[in-house]
Image: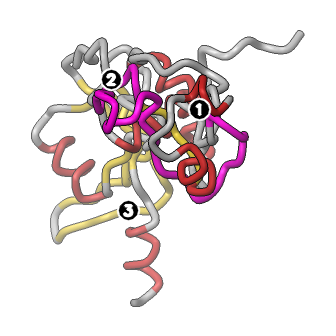
Amino acid sequence: MNRSVAALESSPALVLNADFRPLSYYPLSLWSWQDAVKAVFLDRVNIVSEYDQQVSSPNFKMRLPSVVSLKTYVKPALFPAFTRFNVFLRDRFTCQYCGVQSDLTFDHVIPRSRGGQTRWDNVVAACSPCNLAKGGEMPEVIGMLPMQAPYRPTVFELHRNGRLFPPNYLHESWLDYLYWDSELEP
């Protein structure tokens, strides 16, 4: 891959809602440079910030957008989808029995063999050793209560937790929009 193509591929655009908040924090709402340019041409976004990198055609030049905001506000769902990833995000990628942050799976607090259901209020993140140790037993019987009772989080709670796990790459033009609601130091 030549350097100019590599530079383009490493130039995603941060996507903000019309209120200038990211659509999501984890995963961070990013579009490829191609999707960002297409959205500009379709007049669906405003360019908020740009890279120095350009794309061009014989009669047109454009700096790549680094931050775009949607022209139409997308109302976020109040409650997120029940997925394995969202359970881990709710529990901050931490085993709810021992506090380890690796080898995660999920555990039914009330085992399925005892009528427990696979839903927000009965599933927690658990490391494999704790999950195996608990097995099909009731938590109270074997003294393995989760650190936090399982619950259905809001999208806002997941966004808050997602901010604790920034991606490996953050372009400097994104920083003003990612943590704008955090408390300022005096």
Measure the C-alpha gap from mark 2 to mark 3. 24 Å
Q: On the rendered structure, is 97 left or right of 134?
A: right
Give the residue type that dot 3 points to.
Answer: Gln
Question: Do tag 3 and tag 1 residues touch (Cβ < 8 Å)?
Answer: no
Asked whether residue 118 is drawn in magenta, I would say: yes
Residue at x-position 47% and y-position 84%: 3
Q: Horizontal and vertical percent for residue 24? A: 40, 32
Number of callouts = 3
Asked whether residue 105 is drawn in magenta, I would say: yes
Give the residue type that dot 1 points to.
Answer: Arg
Task: Give the camera-side residue of 155 and 100.
Answer: 100
For the record, the magenta segment spans: 96-122
In front of the other: label 3 or label 1? Answer: 1
Question: Do tag 1 and tag 2 residues touch (Cβ < 8 Å)?
Answer: no
**Which residue is labeled 3 in the image?**
54
Give the residue type that dot 2 points to.
Answer: Asn
- Which color scheme is applied? secondary structure
Measure the C-alpha gap from mark 1 to mark 2. 17 Å
Q: Is residue 170 visible?
A: no
**Which residue is labeled 2 in the image?**
17
Residue at x-position 89% and y-position 9%: 186
Measure the C-alpha gap from mark 3 to mark 1. 30 Å
Above or below residue 34? Residue 140 is above
Extreme-left residue of the structure: 42
**Which residue is labeled 1 in the image?**
163
Q: Earlier in the sequence, mark 2 or mark 3?
A: 2
Q: Horizontal and vertical percent for residue 181? A: 60, 14
